[in-house]
Amino acid sequence: MEELIEFLDQSNKEEYRALGKKINIPISDFEPYIHYESEVYTRNCIKRTEAYELLLLCWDEGQITPIHCHNNQECWVHVLKGNLHEIRYRGDAPNLKIEQELDLLKEGMSYMNDDMGYHSLENIAKGKAITLHLYMNPIDECNIYDEANQKFELIEMTYHTFEGELVEA
Ligand SMILES: [Fe+2]
């Protein structure tokens, strides 16, 4: 993983885009950042710079994100453990339409940005899942879809752990 961070620190946007095939990191490298909560999937920041944030998301069985945007940034997801179901949406509230459904399998890579619409992710593994997310640039707030009221609301993004330390709520 040190190699990955070195690569990220020295790379420009074009090189980030070619990252897909380069990730081959033993899961033991991520041990300090693995943190689960029973109620929600967790966002654990491994490294944050002005250019990017590298997060480890830890999912208990069945945990799911709301439908969300990416605040005009780019997002790569790499599955380290388990598998996830991704649903991509187009349109505007309250008329979101499912455009595509994908299963993200172990070692799979997915890419998303706002031009591609909105999406949600769900852990469909029997047991826990772990995914590595690269956001470029970091995302401090994003719109999430409130399905009950059929509208988007802007929320501030938070971390459950930062560089391996628990973040106070
Ligand atoms: Fe996302």
Image: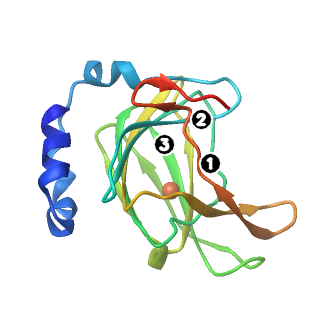
Give me the disc on residue 89.
none
Neighbor class of circle 2 (other Cα within 10 Å; few <14, some 14-19, many 20+) is: many
Query: In the displayed structure, does residue 55 sit left or right of residue 36?
Result: left
Q: Mark 2: which amino acid?
A: Tyr
For the residue carrying disc 3, how many other residues have a C-alpha within 10 Å: few (<14), some (14-19), or many (20+)? many
Task: Write down the residue under mark 2.
Answer: 41
Q: Which residue sits at x=46%, y=73%?
A: 72
124 relative position to 30: left or right: right
Please report whichever mark, 3 or 2, sits nearer to the chain's N-terminal start. 2
- Residues 165 and 62: in front is 165
Position of residue 145 measured from the top left corner of the image (x, y, whole percent): 72, 63
Mark 3 falls on what kind of element?
strand
Say if mark 2 contacts mark 1, CB within 8 Å. Answer: yes
Q: Which amino acid does label 1 sit on?
A: Thr
Residue bearing mark 1: 65
Instruction: Give the quadrant of residue 4.
Output: top left
Amino acid carrying label 3: it is Leu
18 sits to left or right of 87: left
